[in-house]
Image (cartoon, rainbow, N blue to C red):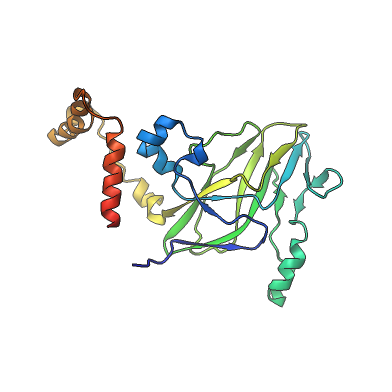
Amino acid sequence: MNAEPVVSFYRLIEQTTLPQRADRFGAGLLPIRAARYCDSITSATGFGWWLFPPMNFSLLWDGHQVFWQYEGAEDWLSLTTAQFPNQLSRFNEGAPEALRGCSPPFLTVLPEPGLVQIWTGLLARTAPEWSLLIRPLANMPTRSDIEFFEGIVETDRWFGPLFTNVRLSITHTAINFSDDSPLVQVQPIPRTSYDDETLNTARLISDISKFTAQDWADYDRHIVSPNDDVNRPPGSYAKAVRKRRRCSVA
């Protein structure tokens, strides 16, 4: 059965690496024990798609002003807003006449100190009632030179560039971005999962005396009894989840 895709990506910058399904093993960077036995980690790591920068480039912040550099540029360039090199002419060749000159900027310095917006070269459209969470790479080593902001975009009713906002954490040092290293991870989420009606209905069982017999039975089945079995193989939770996943697909 061919289901309608939950997301469609549109590439405007032709050099941009196509989105890749996020790797459950973090491109080999997850600890081996996590990769083998912890399905909760591998599921989160592989949830969504990796998006890449459209080119190799560098940013530099002197504490007041941001500069950027790319292959072919003779020196550091002062940055306020910048088009991807030669992109405006390529955009104008393909766009309707009324929209020529409206190519999204590749880089934009935001009003707050050290904040820069980076465009992936992509647009996206999601199925009705689905949005995209744009976030740092799940369970991957974090960078010390930049901090990523997360954002939820309602891409079922907003058709525009997929970008990320970053805070530059160091000054007077080049911060490098590579077109073959994922920049951000995007994850599809139903709109109901983050609306107030859903989030305001969380239930709190505030005292152990309020646990039901079923709660204690489940705790015993999942936590206590498995640890009493000296012959229990490691990774039983991961095996059970994978089996359930195969059954649901079948």
The answer to whether one can see residue 113 in this image is no
Residue 141 vs residue 202, the one in the foreground = 141
Q: List x then y, in percent, for residue 26.
A: 49, 40
Q: List x then y, in percent, for residue 98.
A: 70, 75
Q: Residue at (73%, 72%) from the top-left corner?
A: 93
Q: Quadrant of the C terminus?
A: bottom left
The answer to whether one can see residue 157 in this image is yes
Above or below, comparing residue 47 to residue 131 in the picture? above
Q: Residue at (47%, 34%) from the top-left corner?
A: 30
Residue 235 vs residue 161, the one in the foreground = 235
Q: Residue at (70%, 45%) from the top-left corner?
A: 111
Above or below, comparing residue 113 to residue 9 in the picture? above
Q: List x then y, in percent, for residue 233.
A: 26, 30
Q: Is residue 127 left or right of residue 185?
A: left
Residue furthest toward the left? 213
Residue 244 vs residue 7, the one in the foreground = 244
Q: List x then y, in percent, for residue 70.
A: 77, 47
Residue 82 vs residue 19, the one in the foreground = 19
